[in-house]
Each structure stands twice: as C-alpha cells, then as structure tokens.
Image: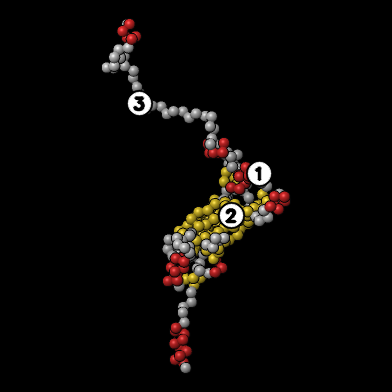
C-alpha cells in the first residue's frame, strides 16, 4: 500500500507556472513614461506596449447614437524580451501648431468637430505580438509547454472574429498636458488636407554646369536665308 502511494506521487505531472507579463510604469519627464517588465517568455519574444485614454462624447444628443466610449491611442512602441526583461518608452504628449502640449485626440478634436470628455486615467497595455498561423497563440503555447509554462486564462482575450491574444493592463491617473514650447513651423502636409499650397510653383533647381555660348556659329547644318543675306 505504501509502495502504491509512492508511485502515484511520482507519476503526478509537474505543476505548470503561469506566464508572467507584469510591468511597471514610471514617469521620467513631463509626458514621458518608462515601461519595464520581467517575464518568463521565450527570448526575443515581441511585446507591443500602448497607452490609451478613454473618451466620452460630451454632447448628450450625439451620445444617444453612440453610448459606448471611444478611445485614443496616445503612443505605442514594441519591446523585445532579452534575458527575461523588456522595456520601452512612451511619449504621451504632442506639440500643437501653436506650441501647446496636447494629446493626439486634442489636436484632432477641432477637425472632428466633437466635444469629448476625457477619462482621468490612462490605460497602459502590454500585448503579445501576433504569431503566424491559424491560431495565433498555438505556436506560443506549444513553445511554453516545453518550459512548463502555461497561458493564464485571465490574460487571454478574444476579438470579434475569434482571434485570441494575450494582454495585461495597468491604469494610472494622468492629467492632461499643460504648458508649451516654441510654435512649430507649418509643414506642407499640415496645409490644405496634406496637399500644401498647390498654387505655389516649386523653383527649378539650378544647373550645376555653367554653359558658355560660343562666339561663332558651330554647326554643319545648311545656312539659313538670313545668313545668305549677310
């Protein structure tokens, strides 16, 4: 009986460890945040990091047609796992044409003609980059299984078309940008819907070769009537 119990314990499968996608967010400069994490993902795995702010439509009439909040992607950057670590930097601020620091949705708000009410928090997302194949996570799951690691169901999400992906989030209270800098010089792509000033004809570049007109006519063509009169 003791022998049977000992054998049963030896035959039990080893416990699998959950995948680790935890990360920290630190404010380095105004609008700039450093995101870093330690993970048990395979070496050279790709992690896509993004920062988003949810937006509500302030107009009650317009909100009746779209009650769900939308969101703006403030910045996103890839990160590569190396020696069990990954890190990247996100810049949530942009510079408006008048020099004010703003988020991307604030700059486009005037063109969209929408009154938006921003959330007081920003959500940072760490998402595993897609893996080729019919099931994007199947290849990763097989690779992790060899290392006795499993994908926690709490981290697995699904899209409307049935695609699965792994994602972890962290929410932080971040105020809207303040202050500003020297106004930017307008770029052609910022004018006339990206076409620039179409009425301006660009100057032709100067010929780098200096041409000298010969003093005497040099040609083997037949003489013209004017030359005969001379």
Residue that badge 2 annotates = 52
Q: Quadrant of residue 155?
A: bottom right
**Residue occupying the point 51% across, 67% down:** 20
- Residue 188, above or below 82: above
Tell me where residue 216 sits by quadrant.
Answer: top left
Residue at x-position 54% and y-position 66%: 156
Residue 173, relative to residue 219: is it above or below? below
The tally of labels here is: 3
Residue 24 picture location, percent across and down: 54, 61
Q: Is residue 85 above or below residue 203?
A: below
| 51 displayed left or right of 207 | right
**Callout 1 touching callout 2 (CB < 8 Å):** no
List the single residue furthest toward the bottom. 1
Secondary structure beneath dot 1 equals loop
Residue at 53% x, 32% y is 198
Q: 94 or 205: which is nearer to us? A: 205
Colouring scheme, one of rainbow, by chain, secondary structure, one colour: secondary structure
Determine whether the residue tagged by mark 2 lies in a helix, strand or loop: strand
In the image, is 220 to the left or to the right of 57?
Answer: left
Mark 1–mark 2 distance (CA, rounded to whole Å): 21 Å
Residue highlighted by disc 1: 113
Q: Is residue 191 above or below residue 167?
A: above
Q: Which residue is mark 3?
A: 209
Does residue 20 appear in this view?
yes
155 horizontally vs 216: left or right = right
Residue 101: mark in rendering: none
Q: Position of residue 17 (x, y in %)?
A: 49, 72
Residue 71 x/y as whole percent? 61, 53
Q: Where is residue 160 shown, x and y percent of the image?
A: 57, 60
Q: For the residues marked 3 and 1, what is the alpha-carbon distance in whole angstroms? A: 53 Å
How crowded is the residue under tag 1: few (<14 C-alpha within 10 Å), some, or many (20+)?
few
């Amino acid at each position: 009986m003791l022998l049977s119990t000992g054998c049963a314990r030896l035959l039990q499968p080893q416990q699998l460890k959950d995948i680790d996608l935890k990360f920290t967010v630190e404010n380095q400069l105004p609008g700039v945040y450093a995101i870093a994490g330690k993970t048990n993902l395979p070496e050279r795995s790709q992690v896509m990091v993004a920062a988003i702010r949810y937006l509500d439509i302030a107009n009650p009439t317009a909100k009746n047609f779209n009650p769900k909040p939308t969101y703006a992607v403030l910045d996103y950057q890839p990160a590569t796992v190396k020696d069990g670590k990954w890190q990247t930097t996100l810049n949530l601020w942009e510079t408006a044409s008048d020099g004010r620091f703003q988020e991307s949705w604030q700059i486009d708000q005037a063109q969209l003609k929408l009154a938006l009410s921003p959330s007081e928090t920003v959500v940072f997302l760490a998402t595993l980059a897609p893996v080729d194949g019919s099931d994007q996570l199947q290849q990763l799951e097989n690779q992790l299984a060899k290392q006795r690691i499993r994908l926690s169901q709490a981290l697995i999400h699904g899209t409307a078309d049935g695609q699965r992906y792994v994602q972890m989030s962290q929410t932080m209270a971040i105020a809207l940008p303040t202050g500003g800098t020297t106004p930017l010089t307008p770029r052609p792509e910022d004018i006339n819907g990206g076409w620039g000033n179409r009425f301006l004809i660009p100057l032709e570049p100067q010929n780098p070769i200096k041409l000298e007109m010969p003093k005497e006519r040099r040609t083997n063509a037949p003489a013209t009537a004017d030359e005969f009169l001379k």
